[in-house]
Image: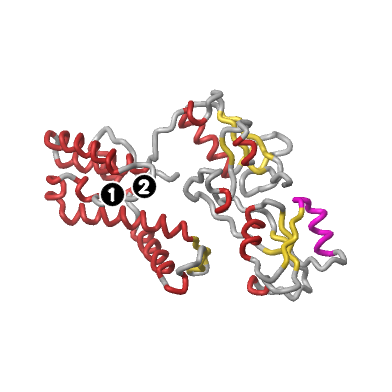
Amino acid sequence: MGFDGKTLIHPNQIGPCNAAFSPSAEEVASARKIIAAFSLPENKDKGVVQLDGRMVERLHADMARRTVAIARAIEERDLEGQSVAESGVIARLDPPLHHPSRSWRTMSMHARRVRGWQLQAGNAMRRLWFVVLLCSLAFPRWASANDIAPGGTLRAVYLGSNPAQAVQDRATGAIRGASADLARELGKRINVPVELKPAANPPRR
Amino acid sequence: MIDAVSSGAADIGFVAYEPSRAGTVEFSQTYMLVQQSFLVLDGSPIRAVADIDRAGQVIAGVRNDSITLYLKRKLKQATLLEVENNPAEIQRLLTGKKSTPLAPTGSASRR
């Protein structure tokens, strides 16, 4: 669902969460392949390339770079083990993973607070903060219902003519599909009801 | 779709990524990739995507659809014919006397 981390309330959660949120070896290998493909001189100006029979776009290269940056940060943390934890995991993320909505300045404030906690907490707790940090990197901002659905109901529209987005059951009226799932999940997270409507085809211009 | 959101009639919409829409639309990370196909008749000389962009060929695409916007930017030789999203009309274009061999099917849902 696009998450990079979660907040934890117990050190026992660290292992499973690190396993779940760390990019797998296959993901990292595939990310490196994508980066390499777009680095080729013949692909310099291309927006889309074919890789192992799949269509890969330039935006995937950006995502791949992020995956590799996360994997590298984790690798360095694991390699340096205790000393990393002692110096604060923040240092391992410097330069910060690129995220347009989250400035390093904000992260530094986090860093200072985390550092203070680290002095009191054990090694396990330090590892926990790494996950929390990834989490704060992953979320561009904490959006609220007021920002997204000021009317108190999330009104979502999808392209009615596109079954890849969603399809409506003629008999029951139920709407199923990726767009429906995404809208409902967003509604759940900001705690508002969801009203899903098919929109007409692109307007004539 | 974009009009519905910008006019305030809807809060969010699902629309395919298109560079010309960036700025108007704040796109999320990619959550879906949809592969597009060209629709041709059995006897069409077009056998591969590489055969598409040839002079004299007319390609029909749904007006303002992301794939049509993409073709508008990419096609150098072939002519793009923008049509309404009407299956009957697309069928007529394919089978009728007009030499309109292709139409991209469906529409992209990646955003």
Q: CA distance from mark 2 to mark 1?
A: 8 Å
Q: Position of residue A159 (x, y in %)?
A: 65, 43
Residue ID at (74%, 76%): B45
User: Relative to A34, does residue B51 appear above or below in the rendering?
Assistant: below
Above-or-below relation of B39 to A18:
below
Q: Quadrant of residue A63?
A: bottom left
Q: Position of residue B54 (x, y in %)?
A: 70, 74
In this rendered view, identify the residue nearer to me: A154 or B64. Answer: B64
Residue A169, compared with residue B73, is above or below; it is: above
Other residues around mark 2 within 10 Å, as few (<14) / some (14–19) / many (≥20): few
Q: Name which residue type carries label 2.
A: His
Magenta stretch: residue B90 in it? yes
Where is residue B46? Give x, y as percent: 71, 73
Report in which chain the residue with disc 1 lies. A
- Residue A190: mark: none
Colouring chosen for the image of the structure: secondary structure
Residue B62, how many percent across, how many down? 72, 54
Q: Main secondary structure of the magenta part?
A: helix
Q: Quadrant of residue A175?
A: top right
A125 or B95: nearer the eye?
A: B95
- Would you say A186 lies left or right of A200 here? left
Where are the magenta residues, as a range? B84-95
Q: Residue at x 78, y 53 (%)?
A: B87
Asked if the residue at tag 1 contacts the one at tag 2, i.e. Cβ–Cβ closer than 8 Å, the answer is yes
> SS for tag 2?
loop
Question: Dot 1: few (<14), some (14–19), or many (≥20) neighbours within 10 Å?
Answer: some
Displayed quadrant of residue A101: top left
Local SS, label 1: loop
The amino acid marked with disc number 1 is Pro
Q: Which residue was labeled with disc 1?
A: A96
* Camera-side residue of A4 and B76: B76
